[in-house]
Image: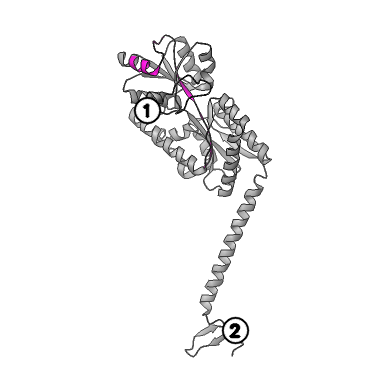
Amino acid sequence: MKNRKREICTSGSVRDEDGQPPHLLGRRKFLHLAAGAAALSAISRIAWAQAYPTRPVRLVVGAPAGGGFDIVARLMGQWLSERLGRPFVIENRPGASSNIATEAVVHAPADGYTLLLLTTANAINITMYEKLSFNLSRDIAPVASITRVHDVMVANLSVPSTTVPEFIAYAKANPGKLTMASGGVGTPSHLEGELFKTMIGVDVVHVPHRGTAAALTDLLGGQVQVVFTSMPSVIEYIRAGRLRALAVTTATRSELLPDIPTVGEFLPGYEGGIWYGLGAPKATPAEIVDKLNKEVNAALDDPKMKARLADLGGTPLQGSPVQFGKLIAEETEKWAKVIRAANIKPQG
């Protein structure tokens, strides 16, 4: 009996040679095999991430070619192509304030081969549009922040103000008479202006336009008095003395306009600007997300990349995926308050 695999105990129950009932041994084997499978899966994922990418990667941009969104995407796409040895192909899918591009990435396979250029617009849209087919925080994984671009508060030369305090005093003396142009309802330039109006407690009439170019045409012509807009779109007008820069909207001054103060220097807590980063479908393997994050942060350490971003009026935004996710959440909450306070609705 001693050499048999199983034996009958005096109680009549069946035991294995190690004294365990067969059902317990089977459970142990199952757990052992499951643990082995999990370890093998983890090793497989790591190996997959190490080999990634093995084919071209799509980077979807929710804006037309040639604008600031596109330029940032192409700068980072070129860097990643050179570092990782596979093309990162820019796919422009404009429309619905970048919602079309976001939806395309949400429904793409979560394998690291479809990425999204995330921007301030994505944080705004969460509140701006009530019936989106996706939930940004649920459906998109933050990969890496890239840069925050300085926007500028610029005035027509006829406005008798050279500083933010002077403009506030002028607006208070002329409530409802000053006009503020933007590139459209719900755009970052619109919401930066609305945030400013909320904080100074004075009405400045919003005049939406079909794009930044049209808004600047009216500003230059004196049809409107002030615009909050991107640095690249107005820097030459400022340098030529055709428009007056009152302040930059970001928390820090711009290297392109070092003598121009921030709005926050006069209105503590004010911060605007447009940020950019990379996102991916939510279930994208963490190993691939981490690999991309590492490469983006390496780019932001590179002097040539820093110089290119500075030319756009941008400063590097290094950080982890978790930190980028926190930024998106904070920006979503901030702009949601502005949208609700001003009762802003998307244009039909």
Q: Residues within 10 Å of mark 2 (few under 14, many from 20)?
A: few
Quadrant hosting residue 298: top right
Residue beneath the point at 63% across and 40% down: 57
Q: Nearer the viewer, residue 61 or 325?
A: 325
How are the colours assigned in the image? one colour
Label 2 element class: loop
Tell me if I can see residue 348 in this picture.
Answer: no
Tell me, yes or no, whether the two marked residues, 1 and 2, touch with CB atoms within 8 Å: no
Residue beneath the point at 55% across and 49% down: 286
Residue bearing the label numbered 2: 5
Quadrant hosting residue 155: top left
- The quarter of the picture where the N terminus appears is bottom right
Label 1 element class: loop
Residue bearing the label numbered 1: 268
Does 161 lie within the magenta span? yes
Tell me if I can see residue 44 in this picture.
Answer: yes
Q: Nearer the viewer, residue 340 or 250?
A: 250
Quadrant hosting residue 195: top left
Residue 113 placement, left or right of 267: right
Magenta range: 142-169
**Residue 51 at x, y = what percent?**
66, 48
**Residue 33 at x, y = what percent?**
58, 67
